[in-house]
Image (cartoon, rainbow, N blue to C red):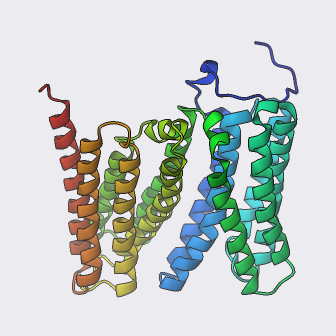
Amino acid sequence: MKKGLWQPPRLRIDEEHEGRRATWLELFYDLVFVVAIAELSHNLSKDVSLGGFVGFVALFLPIWWCWIGATFYATLFDTDDLGDRLLTLLQMSIIIALTVNLHHGLSASSQGFAIAYIAARCILILQYLIAGHYVSEARALTSWYVKGFSIGTAFWLVSLFVPIPWRFGCWALGLIVEFITPIGTGDLAVKIPPNMSHVPERMGLFTIIVLGESVAAVVRGVAGKQWDTSSILTAILGVSIAFSFWWLYFDSVDVSPLETMKAGRMKVFLTWLYSHLILAIGLAAIGVGVEHLISNSGVNVLPGNERWLFCGAVALCLMILALINFTTCVLDKIQQGRILSAYRLGAGSFVLFLAIAGSNLSAVVLITLVACACMVTVALDLFTKNQFSLPT
């Protein structure tokens, strides 16, 4: 079908778009978030402490939420026309400005960070207003999003006029309002669900972005240290952990959470969705942890804060993967899903035990134990899925 330069938004949930894939523009859009995650990881690498991790999470939340907002609008309404492309490119420019302000986002650049976030949300609100004007059957849903996102953005606007730390309190209130906005959509979202193939693919692509940061961290760690047996072994094991998480996540991806949403079980879907935020935070933190383990690969005892960052992030990811796996099995394969989730919980508990009791472990021994726990989990997954696939 021939397209004009401008087309009004349309719903993209019919059968024609059931097999829709990510567009080239969406993939280009993701590139700015690759840079943002790298900058966030750099900040955490400079301050591997509880305060540094809290700051890392505080800045990660609005970055991820901007990506989610654009992703879910695109899966429902984008037309890939001139107007849509220009607004997307404008959003990319705003996210670049957001990334520029990340370095001192909780201090000197906090006001610039807030302004960029407000601009990004205003673009999304404008897109939903336009979509609601042209797509009458979606107007109730778009109006709900506009109200919720506008209230949340208003808190960020107020933050520009209050000093630190009250500014961050306004940010938190704004994000809370925006995060709970989808919960109130109820039957509106059930009647107009996101595309069944597009959303899992987009969530997987963001997971690839943060996994890529783990690989980049290995490269940075090895490049900044003279090669020896311990550093090379640590780097190899770090890559194996990234590969294990890739396997555990993508070997269980399906459309079950969206099926639950269509069945009216909105809370299950939102649990699946928001679990990806925690997973992304954990995977990015693992990359920083591996980089520090490579730097300290020749040290007999790893510093406690670095041990906790690495083991805590790995344990968090394993436990969140257990939750994500369980949400993909609530409609079918319930027994298999519970078994696979139990494997992840068990591995996560073991790694958490290492964080608590591994104060005398060297970096090489610690990462060896963690990598083995991850690889054993993968092996158990393969064995269990093979058992369930055998004819009875």
Q: Taking the image as drawn, is residue 91 in sight? A: no
The residue closer to the viewer here, 243 or 144, is 144
The image quadrant of residue 140 is top right
> Which residue is more in the foreground, 97 or 335?
335
Indicate whether 100 appears above or below 382: below
Number of marks in picture: 0
Residue 118, horizontal then vertical, whole percent: 81, 63
Residue at 25%, 56% in the rendered image: 342
Name the residue at 35% across, 53% down: 245
Q: Could you tell me which residue is drawn at 46 percent across and 68 percent down?
A: 285
Q: Is residue 62 left or right of residue 163?
A: left
Q: x%, y% of residue 251?
A: 34, 41
- Quadrant housing residue 133: top right
Please state if 315 lies on the left or on the right of 103 as rendered: left
Quarter assignment of residue 353: bottom left
User: From this viewpoint, is residue 248 visible?
Assistant: yes
> x and y percent of residue 153 in the render?
79, 64
Q: Quadrant of the N terminus?
A: top right
Relative depth, front residue between 371 and 175: 175
